[in-house]
Image (cartoon, rainbow, N blue to C red):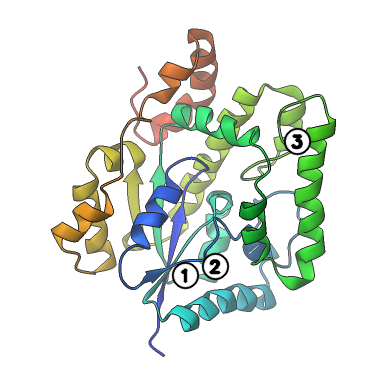
Amino acid sequence: MKAYTPVIIIGAGRSGTNMLRDIITSIDGFKTWDCDEINPIWRYGNRDFPTDELPVEKLSPRIKKYIRGRFNSLHKKTGANFIVEKTCANSLRLNYVHAIFPNAKYIIINRDGRDVVPSAMKRWVSSFELKYTLKKLRYVPITDLSFYIWRFGFNRLKKIFSNTENLAFWGPLYSGIEEDVKTKSLLETCANQWRICAEKTIEHREYIYSEKIFDIKYEEFVSNPVEEMKRLSDFFEVFISEEKIIDLVKKVTDKSVGSHKRKFSAEEIQKITKITKPTLKKLNYSID
């Protein structure tokens, strides 16, 4: 069977990774898993590691073979030329992912962290979705199934029986997240979560050849999706007609750009800006 190219979308939670994956996998020859994320596969052999910041030293030949095997299985099943994957926790361990797939194409999507915060906060207080959870459990390594059933159950039960509306955890698990959940507001925790994910990606991308990376700013993509998709098709070296591109991006909207200004008070904006400003500057965002 013809070889395939892994396409790994890297971005903090609520940065547009779902939107990007869904558009890309609507192109002929691009396929992905029929669930939101496959973090248990990426964490195979390291399920007990306390965070998602898996160091390369934790990657063994057995683990590498298993993860590549899951990609290979999807390729054999679909015959796709490109296997696309987006798990937001990979923004904390890009070097680990790259060690598994050194020849992959990497799409790094960034978004103004201040706009990420209100969207992330909704997920932290979201209700239980059985269908969503069952889809994710289908791709949990069989040896780890009981562990993740307990983990998902604990997260929901803690919310039900505690005095907080928040889940015990949501999204990428960074070092210090447990302390932040205990001592900081949800707004501050979400801002920290975005900041650390973005900073880790900035740090780790330095070890990847630039021609293997395609950078997207969420704000630029939603403002001019047709031109951004043309750039992306060049990166993939795949021809996509303009008619097809227009159809692919017909549901893209920029209504969420600047959402933090509508959602938060001046005091709250000041708080999240203080946390996110240094990282936003590194990503060439203007701070007004």
Query: Residue 124, image x and y in percent?
Result: 64, 34
Which residue is tagged 3? 178
Do the residues bearing badges 1 and 2 touch, measured as CB atoms within 8 Å? yes
Badge 2 is on which residue?
99
Residue at 47%, 47% in the rendered image: 11
Location of residue 94 with respect to 12 vertically, above or below: below
Q: Nearer the viewer, mark 2 or mark 3?
A: 3
Q: Earlier in the sequence, mark 2 or mark 3?
A: 2
Q: Residue at x 69, y 41 (%)?
A: 175
Q: Secondary structure at mark 2?
A: helix
In the structure shown, which secondary structural element does the residue marked by tag 1 occupy? loop
Which mark, by number, is residue 102? 1
Disc 1 from disc 3: Cα separation = 32 Å
Q: Residue furthest right?
A: 161
* Amino acid residing under circle 3: Glu
Residue drawn at (24%, 62%), measured in percent from left and top? 233
Classify residue 2 as left or right of residue 93: left
Camera-side residue of 190 and 127:
127
Residue extending furthest toward the bottom: 1
The answer to whether residue 48 shows anywhere in this view is no
